[in-house]
Image (cartoon, rainbow, N blue to C red):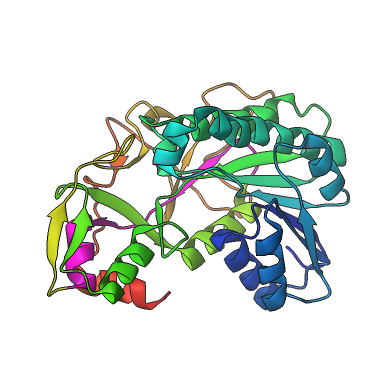
Amino acid sequence: MFDGKDILITGGTGSFGKKYTEILLANYKPNRIVIYSRDEQKHYQMAQTFNQKCMRYFVGDVRDEKRLKTAMSGIDFVIHAAAMKHVPIAEYNPMECIKTNINGAQNVINAAFEEGVKKVIALSTDKACNPINLYGATKLASDKLFIAANNIAGTKETRFSVVRYGNVVGSNGSVVPLFKKLIKQGVSELPITDERMTRFWITLEQGVKFVLKNFSRMQGGELFIPKIPSMKMTDLAKAMAPNLGIKIIGIRPGEKLHEVMIGKDDAIHTYEFSDHFVITPSITFLTHPDFSVNLIGEKGEKIKGEFEYSSDKNTQWLDENGINEMIGSL
């Protein structure tokens, strides 16, 4: 699907963008991979590893619609990974988060329409479901913008979908690198915000492959959610440092005790497939697509009755062995 194609990744110098680039280059022969990011130093560092002829490094901010349009010239597929993601920082700098996560999302949509991009997938987060923090609220707004964009496409072929998943093991700013750093420093205790806390977990490679697959699946308007395991944060600490104690430090501003990826109110719009869920648009699309069957022929069943896909009520759990195996895959 990506052979001979032109692909742009916003926020492409981050953990996701680098892994996505790695997997694209290993499995396909793209014409161009355009890395769009505002951090010139990260561009320089990434170019030391990925310097193939198809690579292009484009310094720019998603807040800049004109620059986005220039970067998207001739692009077939866009992965929108750029976002302001740190929950406490967003709480203290709300307008900056809104400018990047909401205004930036609309800029990506406008540029994709203007330049005739075929398909766009935007990355979301479990924090966008029933949000209690600003980061989650801005990502919910972003999700709504991308889904609704399909209904204003008119005669344009551009289609938009969203992928939502949980915490990525080992990504920049996540808890695994923090714990590794503290263990190396010789601390006697690892900090846990609450002993009851649970999270969904996915590896970077799993997340990238899920997004790749959904470019083939998408009709436009779907919100894709993978079936992934949960883990207790206390189990993570015990698995990484069985001989260290645990210090309860309290929940941070805007942090949840458990994460939800499909809320009870979304269940009526949800189809369950073998390895993922699809939340369909709550608004009626003019094209009336059949979301029970995707473009590669996979069939889903409509969720019936009350349902909530949350990290504390999950049917898949990682024990200490599973946690160590996941961390060892980094």
Q: Quadrant of residue 285?
A: top right
Q: Is residue 206 visible?
A: yes
Q: How many marks?
A: 0
* Percent coordinates x, y for residue 195 in the rendering: 14, 50
Quadrant containing the C terminus in the rendered view: bottom left
Q: Residue at x 70, y 74 (%)?
A: 25
Quarter occupied by residue 184: bottom left
Inspect the magenta stretch and tell me whether residue 283 lies in it.
Answer: no
Out of 184 and 81, give the one closest to the viewer. 184
Q: Quadrant of the N terminus?
A: bottom right
Which quadrant holds residue 221? top right
The residue at the point 69 percent across, 26 percent down is 151
Q: Is residue 75 left or right of residue 202?
A: right
Q: Is residue 224 magenta?
A: yes
Q: Position of residue 227 (x, y in %)?
A: 38, 54
Q: Is residue 314 above or below residue 13?
A: above
The answer to whether residue 20 is left or right of residue 326 is right
How far from the left and from the top, in percent, is residue 127?
A: 40, 39
The answer to whether one can see residue 157 in this image is no
**Does residue 214 sit above or below 104 in this rendering?**
below
| Range covered by the magenta-colored residues | 219-241
- Residue depicted at x 79% and y 56%: 58
Vertical arrangement, residue 113 with respect to residue 241, above or below: above
- Tell me what residue is drawn at x 49 percent, y 44 percent: 85
Q: Front-most of 285 and 61?
A: 61
Q: In the picture provided, is 32 more to the left or to the right than 214?
A: right
